[in-house]
């Protein structure tokens, strides 16, 4: 059986691992709240919610919507979140 060819690691150093937490999520959510940036949240069931992030926690975010009830959305149910330019 032929041996698998493993390409060298970029930079040639190796051994350096990426950190488990970069805390960029916290910084980004805080920025969205401070600027009251409208966002579009795509859920794992492909439903979309549009509003402003009002609060976040380790488990969920709270979305404030115009003309509709506010929502608490668990992070594990979020497929992605983007800034809504419309």
Image (cartoon, helix red, strand yellow):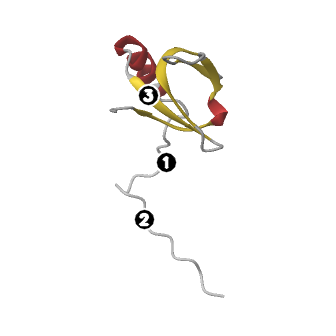
Viewer-nearest of discs 3 and 2? 3
Q: Residue at x 38, y 32 (%)?
A: 84
Residue 57, can we see it?
Answer: no
Q: Residues within 10 Å of mark 1 (few under 14, many from 20)?
A: few
Per the image, label 2 sits on a secondary structure element best described as loop
- Residue furthest bottom in the image: 1
Percent x, y for residue 42? 54, 38
The residue nearer to you, when weighing 33 against 52, is 52
Q: Which residue is mark 2?
A: 8
> On screen, 24 above or below 77?
above
Q: Mark 2 vs mark 1: which is more N-terminal? A: 2
Q: On the rendered image, what quadrant is the N terminus found in?
A: bottom right
Q: From the viewer's perspective, is 31 left or right of 70?
A: left
Per the image, label 3 sits on a secondary structure element best described as strand
Mark number, residue 39: 3
Q: Mark 3 vs mark 1: which is more N-terminal? A: 1
Give the spatial CA distance, label 2 vs label 1.
12 Å
Quadrant of the rendered image containing residue 71: top right
Viewer-nearest of discs 3 and 1? 3
Q: Which residue is mark 1?
A: 15
Per the image, label 1 sits on a secondary structure element best described as loop
Q: Residue at x 34, y 15 (%)?
A: 35
Q: From the viewer's perspective, is 48 left or right of 77?
A: left
């Amino acid at each position: 059986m032929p041996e698998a060819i493993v390409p060298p690691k970029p930079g040639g150093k190796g051994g350096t691992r990426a950190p488990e937490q970069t805390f960029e999520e916290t910084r980004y959510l805080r920025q969205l709240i401070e600027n009251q940036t409208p966002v579009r949240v795509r859920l794992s069931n492909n439903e979309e919610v549009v509003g402003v992030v009002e609060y976040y926690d380790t488990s969920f975010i709270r979305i404030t919507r115009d003309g509709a009830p506010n929502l608490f959305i668990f992070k594990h149910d979020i497929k992605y979140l983007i800034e809504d330019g419309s």
